[in-house]
Amino acid sequence: MSYIELRDVHKIYRVGEMEIHALDGVSLNIEKGEVVIIAGASGAGKSTLLNLLGGMDTVTRGDLIVDGKHVSQFNENELTDYRRFDIGFVFQFYNLVQNLTSIENVELATEICENPLDSLEVLKRVGLEDRIENFPSQLSGGEQQRVAIARALAKNPKLLLCDEPTGALDYVTGKQILKLLQETSKLYHMTVLIITHNLALCPMGDRVFRMKSGKIVEETYNEAPMDIDLIEW
């Protein structure tokens, strides 16, 4: 069994009498420790897929299995525990607590976990050892995103979900963040999913899924993922 399996997953939203098929029969397999790129235009279903994998939304029908757990059958309490213990989130906009320092933002996340990593060590790992006492307003966009990644990593999650993590960053800083995510996967043998509309990022993934209109239209497996330093866009 693969680490992550989706079998004919549908997500249907109802607006009045209208049905919106955000996911329309998605099936895929992902192995542990892979960097996965989910690419597609706005409205393709990428964020819906990420929300289902992160336990923030529920499947209309189909099977969603993560690490042998049938997430699609979880009740609300089980979904809360799943988000709390198994999932790390990195968003386009950093969602840091503005009146907490870098290390306090990271420590806040570790307080709800079973086996967290050391907050200071994780901040050192993302290159912020000299910024630990700074507040978000004293950090650049790239530094704030590094704090957000450190916060997600410190939970020691099984699955790191990244929603357009470079969308608010300039080119150079964006590449640094993507390199950090690529290295993180290797270092911690952590499964990392990155959703993006930027198709140029596809070569960095071990596995790439192209989405359109709620469907997987193409799957690619890269035996030798490209170092992000070599990718241009």
Image (spheres, grey):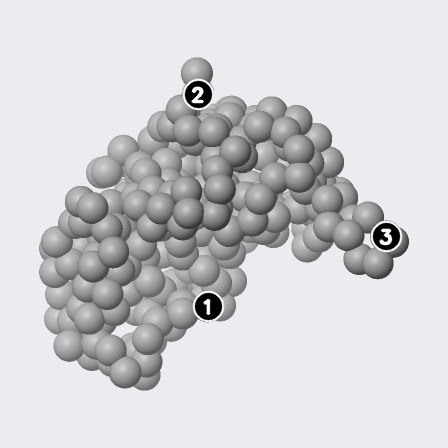
Circle nearer the viewer, 2 or 1:
2
Quadrant containing the N terminus is: top left
> Which percent across, then down, holds residue 120?
12, 60
Q: Residue at x 70, y 31 (%)?
A: 25
Q: Residue furthest top?
A: 1
- Labels 2 and 3: the sequence-earlier one: 2
- Which residue was labeled with disc 2? 2
Left or right: 189 in relation to 131: right
> Which percent across, then down, holds residue 118?
12, 54
Q: Residue at x 30, y 45 (%)?
A: 85
Callout 2–callout 1 Cβ contact below 8 Å:
no
- Which residue was labeled with disc 1? 93
Callout 3–callout 1 Cβ contact below 8 Å:
no
Q: Residue at x 41, y 42 (%)?
A: 78
Q: Residue at x 86, y 52 (%)?
A: 18
Q: CA distance from mark 2 to mark 1?
A: 31 Å
